[in-house]
Amino acid sequence: MARCRPAAPAAALPSPPLPLLLRPPRPPHRCPAALPRPATNQQQRGLAPSQKHRQRRRPGAWPQRRPSPLHAAADAAEAEAAAAAAEPSASGAPAASTSAAAAAPGPGGAAAAGARQEGVRSFDLRLPDAATATAGLGDLDETQLEQQAQARLLCCSLRRLARCFGGGRLDWGFSRLGAPFPEGVSLHSLAETLSPAHFDVSPRKAFAGVALAAAAIAAGCWWQAYMHSICPAWQQVLCWLAIGTGYFGAFQSAVDCARFCFWPQRPLVQDVIGAALMAPALVPYEGWRLQQFNHLLRPNMLWQDSPLWHPLTAPDLAPLPAWRRALLRLANATPLRFLARGLAGWAASWDGLDLRRHPPAARPWVVLSWAVPAGFAALVLPALLAGGGLERLVGWWLAPWLVFNAWQGLVAVAERTAPHIPFVEEGYEYDHGQAVVNGTVNLGLPRWLEALVGGANLGLPRMMSISIPRYNLRPAYEELKAKLGPYLTEADLLSPRLLLNLSTRWLIWDPKRRGYVRFDDLEAGAESEAARAAAAEDGPGPAPQAAAA
C-alpha cells in the first residue's frame, strides 16, 4: 500500500530549490487515522508476531551473501567425498571388512582406523579450472567483487613489504634500476636529438620562478613577524622550512644564471642577478660556477669530482686520528649527513680564498664575487640583529640557511649515491657517458614541490646540456626517459627507505672493494689489518697458540 502524501495547492508556483543548509526541516509525515497503516514486513510474509525474533539478525552479524565459486566447488567436493564414503557401507561385505579391520587388535586394525580417520579429515579438494572460475566472477555481486579487490590489494602490499624488508634490490629504495649504458656514446650527440623547444629561453618564465620562490620566502617571514613572540614552535619550524625551501628554488635561478641560460641576451644583467641571488646563501658566484662546471666535466670521477658530489673515501679516513673519525661518523652516519654535505659544498665554493686556482684574467671577477656575499653578511645580518634581535636573525636567516644547505646536500647525495653507481679514477675505465646516464639517480618529487625547488631533482637534463633552463627540465627529462628508459635509475627523493640507506648504509666509498662500506666495517678492516701486521712482525711462533684458542 502506498503511503499518503500531502497534496500541494493548485495555485502554488514551483519555487527554486534552496540550498541544503537553508531548507526548513521537513515535518514528520503522518497518515490519517481513517486509512489503515501499511503492513509490516513480517505481516507481508505471513509470520506471526511471536516469530519476529526468528527473522531478526544478531547485532553486529554480517548479512548472508551468496558463496563464491571456490566455496561452491569446495562444498561439492565435500559432498562427493561423503557420498563415496557412504557407498561401501551400503553393501555388507566392505562394511563388515572395514568394521572388522577397525575392531581387530594389532597393528593392522589400528593402521586401517588411522587411515579412515585421516581420509575423513583431509578429503581431496578438486578446484575448478580457470575457465570455470573466470566465468563464475560474473555471478558475484558488487560487495564480493569489492572484497576480492581489497584482498588482492592487501596481498600486493604484503609482497612489497616482504621484498622491501626481506632483501632484494627493492630494499635499496629505488623504483627503477638502469642497465649498463653502452660505452663510447657521446653526450653531445644525445643532446642534439632533443627537441629544440627545450632550449628556448623565456625571461618571463624565468622571473616567474623567482617570484614563486620569493612568495614562499615572504609568506614565512610575514607569519613569523605577525605572530612574533606567541608563534608556536611547530609553526616556526614550518616557517623555516618554507623560507629555506623557497630560497633553494631561488638558488636554482642563480644556477641558471651561472650556466648562461637565465637571460643570455643580457649577460651582464644575468651575472648581476645570479650574484644577488647567491648572496643570501653566502656563496660566491664565480666559485660556484667553477664547482658546477667541474662536476659537469668529471661526474663520478674519483678524487676529481667537486666536493658537493664526492663521497668520503676509505684512504682519506685511514690516517685521521680517532677523534676526527668519531666526529665524521656523527656528521655522516646520521641524517646530519645531508647538512654536512651541503656545508662542505658551501665551503668548497670559496676555494680557500686562493686566487691561484683561477686564471689571471678572471681574478677581478672572482674577487668581486667574494665581495658580494661578504657585503651581505656585513650589512644585512647586522640589520636583522638590530631590528628584531637574535630571534629575527635566527628565524629569518640562520635556520632557513641551514634548511637550504640540507636541501643542497640531500639532492647532491641522493643524485650520486647508489650501490650500483661506481666512482672510477681517471683513466681507461672511466666513461663519461656511463657516468652521466648510469651515474645519475633521477629523483621524484610532488609536482608542486618540484616547481617550488626549480626542478633541482631532475639532474639528467642538467648534465646533458647547460643550455636547458629550469622550466624546461621536466619536458626534457620526459623525452630522455622515452629514449633512454632502460638505462635510467629512478627513485622517490622522499622515500623513507632511500633516506635511511643514504644516512646509514652507503657512507664511505672503498676503492679496493669498489663499493660502499660503513664506519664499523672500515674499523673492523683496519683492526684485522693491524692484527695481521702484528702477527707478521712477531713471526710464526704465536700462530699455533692463536689457532688453539
Image: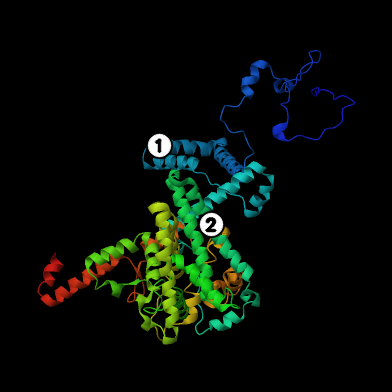
| C-alpha separation, residue under disc 2 versus residue under disc 1 | 90 Å
Image quadrant assignment for residue 536? bottom left
Residue 453 visible, this orientation: yes
| Picture disc at residue 216 | 2
Where is residue 324 shown, x and y percent of the image? 25, 66
Residue at position x 52%, y 51% in the image: 155
Give the structural element (helix, strand or loop) at label 2: helix
Using a 10 Å C-alpha cutoff, classify the residue at mark 2 as few (fewer than 14 neighbours), some (14 to 19) or many (20 or more).
Answer: many
Residue at position x 71%, y 26% in the image: 25
Q: Amino acid at mark 2?
A: Ala
Image quadrant assignment for residue 45? top right
Image height of 265 relative to 215, above or below: below
Image height of 16 relative to 164, above or below: above
| Picture disc at residue 104 | 1
Q: Amino acid at mark 1?
A: Ala
Residue 499 visible, this orientation: no
Tell me which numbered mark, 2 or 1, is placed earlier along the sequence.
Answer: 1
Using a 10 Å C-alpha cutoff, classify the residue at mark 1 as few (fewer than 14 neighbours), some (14 to 19) or many (20 or more).
Answer: some
